[in-house]
Amino acid sequence: MSRQPFVFNFLEKLNYKRILMNNTNPLELIERLNISKKGNSSTSPKVLILTKKIDIESDLLGIQFLKNGIDYVKITEEDIPIDFHFEFKIGKFNEPVLHIGNRKVIPDDIKIVLFRYFDLKFLNYYSGGVYQMYFAQQWYQAFNCLSIGLDALWINNPQRTFDAENRLNQLLSAQKIGFSIPETLITNEMKAAKKFFKRFRKSTIVKVLHHHEIYLNQRSYRFLTNNIETSHLSKFDELTYAPVIFQEKIENDSEIRVTVVNDKTFSCRISTIQKKRNFSDLHKIKEKELIFSEINIGKKIEKLCISLNRKLGLLVSSIDFVQGKNGELFFLEINPIGDWNWIEKHTNLAITKSMFDFVKSLLN
């Protein structure tokens, strides 16, 4: 029995080293232009962003904050451990202090935390072994201290985010509120997987249970949705080592992305100039070969999307659907992070503005 993931090839998407070198963080740009206060000065920002360095959406929001006189600070996964330090004093006086680069941040005035790409369980700045496990555990608990020590509204709440990322939770919640879902099996049991494949022999797909991308040593590795063929039967024993999702493939010629910002929805149909039947995942198609169209999904689906967000405890998300041949929408998954820049580039959907307006209304 081979100890490798079932079916997936780890596709190296990008080398992020050069991208990180050219990354333009609005806060760092202001410092380089000598516009900000002198280094080591104490500041009391209204907004804290927790993310990774390559996060276009957070930088677009950061520009809007600065344009409107809203001070903010950003902590990235890459800042840890060298460029981020903290103090949580407990006793006669309970006082938290954050040190981010040259900025000493007094977090009393932080009212909003935008929680995006920031999961310290997967920190990887040591080569492995017991040291790596130790440091990852300590920083994971440090993050829990941060979530407890800040008296702020989180968008989205970290625990609700992690819970909402669970595929079983997503599918059951979507089904309960009234969405149609494809027939699905989550398993590492070979016999159950073969039985599911026999049931949907010509229309079975497989995808990951967690996120479809891993960042390691400044490189991105992707494992996207695949069609299951009869030739894969001999590899089903590989399921033992890593569970996956088997799902009935809904024949379609497009996917629908609905971005939810509190009580507003932004809907976009994504199709391709290629023959869709040749692809199991739109992420395999070059962006220049995709077609983005603003659509109206109707009040009923809009209300269900907002209801799903609330059921999962989210304020912001992106929800993916496919539309069957008879026009019926099938829920695929929900992403609590909610990337939207790639949608805005090709449409007139003002998602960044809506996010900024939402945060500003909460501050007011």
Image (tube, helix red, strand yellow):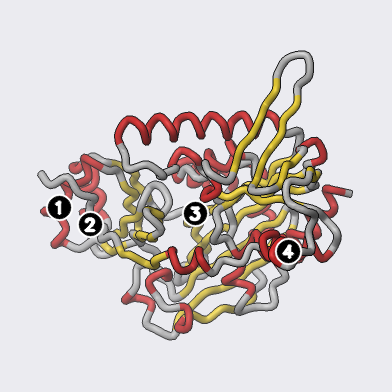
Comparing 286 with 144, the one in front is: 144
Check disc 2 and report its element: helix, strand or loop. Answer: loop
**Gap between marks 2 and 3 measured at Cα:** 21 Å
Q: Residues within 10 Å of mark 2 (few under 14, many from 20)?
A: some
The numbered mark, 4 or 2, whose residue comes first in the sequence reads 2
The quadrant of the picture occupied by the N terminus is top left
Which residue is labeled 2 in the image? Answer: 7
Q: What's the amino acid at mark 3?
A: Glu
Q: What's the amino acid at mark 1?
A: Lys
The residue furthest top is 92
Residue at 67% in and 26% down:
88
Image depth: mark 4 or mark 2 in front: 4
Q: What's the amino acid at mark 2?
A: Val
Which residue is labeled 3 in the image? Answer: 333
Comparing 95 with 319, the one in front is: 95
Comparing 133 with 87, the one in front is: 87
Q: What's the amino acid at mark 4?
A: Ile
Q: Which mark is residue 192?
A: none
The numbered mark, 2 or 3, whose residue comes first in the sequence reads 2
Residue at 35% in and 68% down:
280
Image depth: mark 3 or mark 4 in front: 4
Residue at 82% in and 40% down:
109
Instruction: State the image coordinates of residue 95 (x, y, percent, origin top left).
Output: 75, 26
Check disc 4 and report its element: helix, strand or loop. Answer: helix
Which residue is labeled 1 in the image? Answer: 235
